[in-house]
Every structure is written in C-alpha cells, then in structure tokens.
Amino acid sequence: MSSPETIPLNISGKHKLLGLDHLRALAITYVLLFHYQIFAHPDWENKVGGFGWTGVDLFFVLSGFLIAGQLFSTVAKGKAISMREFFAKRFFRIIPPYLLILGLYAAFPVLREREQMAPLWKYLTFTFNFGLDYRYTGTFTHSWSLCVEEQFYLVLPLMFWLFGYFKGGRKAIYLLIALFLAGFAIRYFNWHHFVEPASTSDHFGAFFNKYIYYSTINRLDGLLVGVGIAGAYTFYPAFKAAINKYANMVMLAGLLVLIAAYFVCTPQAAFSTAIWGYPLIALGYGLIVAAIVCPGNFLYHIKSKVTSQIATLSYGIYLSHKLIIHVTQALLEKAGLDKNGNLMMLCCFCACIVGALVLRYLVERPTMRLRDRVLQRWKQETA
C-alpha cells in the first residue's frame, strides 16, 4: 500500500497530476472490495472484488513514481538530495497515523478483526511481513505492504548513490532491470523449495502467501516500474514525448495487459502468478500511470472532487478499514441489520470514510503542519 503524499506537481512543476487522484481512488476502492470478502458480505462481492488484491500493486507503482520522481527532479536540477529531509517527510506522513491505529489494536483487543496479533516489535520495526503466516496472525495483516514500502525506501538512498555512480545515464537502467529480474529468480527458487512441497497441504495458500506474496524481494515489481517511469520521464524527455503522442493507446495497452494478468493470476496461489503475474500487473499499471500523467491522455485535465477526496483519505482508509468494518458489522448486527446485506456493506464503507476523515483532521493534518515547521527550521539553519 502506498503511503500517499498530496499529489505533487509533475516533473516540470507546471501542472497538478490530476489523473493520479483517479488511480489512487481506484486503488483504495479495489482494496476495500477485496478485503471486505474476509467479513460477512453479499455473494456478488466475490466476483467484483476477487482481483482487488492488485490495488496494492497499483499503490506500489504510484508510490515508486511519485517518491522517486521528486528525488530524480532534485538530481536533475543539480542539487544534492537531503536524506534528512527525505526521511523526515516519510516519518511525519507515515508514522503518526500508523502508530495510532497500531495502538488501538494493541490496547483494545475487541477492535481486532482476528484474534491473533503478532508481537508488537514486528509492527514497530516494519518487519511484520517477514515469515507472515495468516493462520497464526490475523490482525492488521494489511500492514505488510507498508513494511515492503518502508524497507524499500530505507535502501533507496543506496540506489540513488548507485544512480549517481552511473551518472544518471543509460547504465542506471541496468540496475532497475537487475532488481526486476532478481524477483523472477527468487520467486522461482521459493516456489520450488518452499511452496511446491506444500502443494498437497490444506494450508497451501498460507505457504504461498508466506514465501511469495508477502516477501519484500518478491513484490518490488511495482515499485521498480514506478521508479523506472520517473527516471525515464526526468532524464529522457523524448521518451515522455513519444508516450504523450499515444497516451490514450498506451493506457489501453495497460488495460489489456491487466486483463491478461487476470487470467494468468487465476487462481491467485499458482506458479503462473508467482512467476509472471506480479510483473504483468506491475507493467499494466505502469503503462496506465505513464499514460495518465501525459497531457495527451484524456484524463489528464479531468478533475473530480469525489476521486480527489477519496485519494486524500486513501492512507487513512487503508490503515483503519479492517478495524472499522469489524466494529461496524458487530454494532449494526445487534441493531438487526443483515451482515451479508448490501446495506451493511454500504454502511461499512461510509464508516471507513468517516474514520479516515477523523484520522486526517486529528492526526494527519496536525503532524503535516509540524513537519512543515521542522523543515522550515532546517532550511533557516542551513541558509
């Protein structure tokens, strides 16, 4: 799951990337539909939300593009990247709301959607996804994607040092390709040595998720694709111009790749998903992101208050949605509402939005103001 910043200006700094609001809103909606299946739900929801797990992959692509794009832009201007500023921005954006939700889970067991909770230190160190087995840990499991992102951004400075070593030129792409290919190799190894031997087990899905789905090195495809797009658009304007010329066709191509990925990834816990599914999904969403940030795309100038608001609340929704759905269903069932009904589902989704609004105004906005003051003070000290 991406931990989204406010949508920034594009690389040239002249236009707000409105299309990314639509994609972020799509991603969180898709994740909500998928995760709602672990609760009581209408029968039709299985068909609509079955591929919703890929919403996290869209967040990965968006995060890689946005975060790396800001860093590449700094490099392109000939400025040095301030790692202190980089990590401060990540801290103030991610940690305060995360700690609040984690604190609620830890302090009030009644709020947990499942009874099992991992040791607190795993959540605090963002190592929760290592060896995650949902048979024994069922609470706040969606934080695995935050672990992947935080681990990735922990080593991102090293990657940018390597980019600098390669002088930001053509050789830098080889690093991204090498990391991308490493995902194939490691997933292949894990499949044959850990997952396939459990193919006859009743808990095969748990083995697949533990050694394939939740593993950081196996899930870097989306982040690397996002970083690659940001780098290409920053240092190779001719490439962006070529994409812009056929932006709508590129987006259509991305949709077709995702359709192909749907069939490759059905069923989800399969060899085809492990080896080919994640790269295909990353490529499909990458093509859409690459197209939608170009002026030639028909969504580039379309602004929607609905998708803008949902995009703004997406991080809060992601953090709190399982807790809120669990509590909402428990309360409304006592009031006589059918847990499997459409009205219950609507109430749960509305409650998720309300919860995210509370989180935004009580936690996110105050900490963002604090962040701005801290950054401003640092700039004055170095002026």
Image (tube, rainbow, N blue to C red):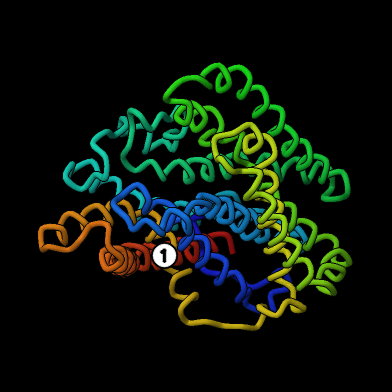
Q: Which amino acid does label 1 sit on?
A: Met
Q: Name the residue under label 1.
A: 368
Query: Residue drawn at (37%, 56%), measured in percent from left and top?
Result: 43
Where residue 220 appears, as percent x and y from the top left, is 63, 41
Where residue 296 appears, as percent x and y from the top left, is 77, 78
Q: In this view, does 119 lie above or below 88?
A: above
Res 270 seen here: yes
Left or right of 291 on screen, residue 344: left
Query: Residue drawn at (49%, 62%), measured in percent from left and top?
Result: 375
Name the outermost residue toward the front: 43
Report the front residue among 35 and 96: 35
Query: Residue drawn at (60%, 58%), measured in percent from left and top?
Result: 62
Left or right of 289 on screen, residue 205: left
Query: Residue drawn at (45%, 33%), measured in percent from left and top?
Result: 127
Left or right of 314 on screen, residue 335: left
Q: Is residue 221 above or below residue 246?
A: above
Quarter of the picture containing the C terminus is bottom right
Where residue 7 appears, as percent x and y from the top left, is 56, 69
